[in-house]
Image (tube, helix red, strand yellow):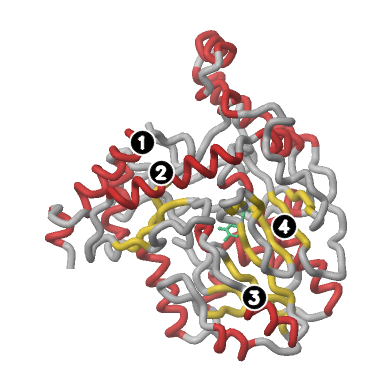
Amino acid sequence: MLLPHPVFRSEELRRVRDAQCLFASSAPPLIWTYNGRGALFQVLLANRLATARSIVLAPSFHCPTVVDPILASGCAPEYYEVGADLDYDLDSLTARLGPRVSAVIAIQYFGWRRDLAPLRSQCERHGVLLIEDCCHSFLRDAPLRLAGGEGHVAVFSPWKLAPCVTAGVIKLNHVTWHPRPPRPLPFGDQLDVLRTLASEWLSYSSVPAAMLGRAVLRRPLIQGLTQSPDELLPKSPESDREGGAPPIVYPFIARTAESRAALASRWVLKRANLEWICASRRRNYDQLFAQLRFNEAMQPLTGPLPSDVCPWALALRIPARARIDFRLRRAGVPLFTFGETLHESLSRGGTPPDLVQRAKLLADSSMCLPVHQQLSSTEIEWMADKVNAMLGSGSGWHRSSP
Ligand SMILES: Cc1ncc(COP(=O)(O)O)c(C=O)c1O
């Protein structure tokens, strides 16, 4: 069975002195948080206290994990439009800046880099903080480095690329204030992360100790290791019913949002082979992009791979997604979605209805295919074949789709 995200396998770690430890440097300062939600929350709270402003401009295409921290920090979201090309219009966004606005969140979707320098200078004219949300990919390639050099602050969610279960990072580029240091993560949460890592290792590693453990421990026992907290593991069951599985919910939990990253997550991340992760993702993306047969039923939302991108996923625009995703899942394609559910505050008064409608259209038609480092070339080919068979030009679905 192919997995949508990488899992912890000790054979992929490096000795720490061999690994390219991008997190070792203290310039610019990095702050470890439990996850990306925690990073956003802590930045927004510190900025609200420093500026006494409370409006945060957020992109119309988002997932609720971007908006929950805005509300939790005592701010209020207002939305700006993101087009079908995942870009925003600088002039209309600039027109929204003013004395009530505390921050703008700009998402670098799927790891693609939007030049934020013009927006940053506009933000500076109005005393507004620009938060570069690099939660989809914390890496840039050629040369390999941390992403997020353009906002006043950048936030990362490293567990989307590296198998560290959970982790977040704040990178302070150009700010005068410092967020309050996060609290130590409670012992029970530390243990939950360790248990999930142990269970993944026992289930998937091919080192002799893990294989022996797998043979000795029965499967229910291994699975019993991961009675993890709500936010660690996807909750929604994969559903066979028409309309697909209910979207996975990643809740905002104040206790962890205020905390530092788990020690075990940091341990894994410091040893993760980031060069290999980035190179494998790039190779898988290129292969998948080349093998998919695009047509009006299936368009790429992310285009050909630029040389500096370490991709989170290959994002597609599929107008009939709700009628097709459950069939692909049933066929074993490990697809996932981003922005499938938009935050309920988007539809409340104040947001222009046509902006809401266009955001919903984007949300309803986007779908992600994984390109992570643990997928082999044969598996990528298999995935492309399955998707092409259902959606590629010449397929039954393509012919029958409106
Ligand atoms: C753009 C973006 N920002 C922030 C987050 C929150 O990251 P985390 O899940 O690590 O809390 C997500 C989560 O998917 C995201 O997609």
Return the disc, 2 or 1, that comes first in the chain's sequence: 2
Return the disc, 3 or 2, that comes first in the chain's sequence: 3
* Pick the front one: 35 or 316: 316
Q: Amino acid at mark 4?
A: Ala
- Choose top left, top right, bottom left or bottom right for residue 271: top right
Query: To which residue does mark 3 refer?
Result: 117
Return the disc, 3 or 4, that comes first in the chain's sequence: 4
Name the outermost residue toward the front: 143
Question: In the picture provided, is 359 more to the left or to the right than 251?
Answer: left
x then y, percent, for residue 275: 58, 40
Question: What is the CA distance from the residue labelled 2 to the residue labelled 4?
Answer: 29 Å
Question: In the picture provided, is 312 more to the left or to the right than 182?
Answer: left
Residue depth check, mark 3 versus mark 4: number of the one nearer the observer: 3
Q: Amino acid at mark 2?
A: Asn
Q: Work out whether 221 lies above or below 145.
A: above
Q: Amino acid at mark 1?
A: Ser
Return the disc, 3 or 1, that comes first in the chain's sequence: 3
- The structure residue drawn at horizontal position 17% and vertical position 57%, both measured from the top left corner, is 393
Question: What is the CA distance from the residue labelled 1 to the residue labelled 4?
Answer: 35 Å
| Quadrant where the image shows the N terminus | top left
x then y, percent, for residue 244: 34, 52
* Pick the front one: 345 or 30: 30
The numbered dot on residue 39 is 4
- Choose top left, top right, bottom left or bottom right for residue 14: top right
| Quadrant where the image shows the C terminus | bottom left
Secondary structure beneath disc 3?
Answer: helix
Question: What is the CA distance from the residue labelled 3 to the residue labelled 4?
Answer: 22 Å
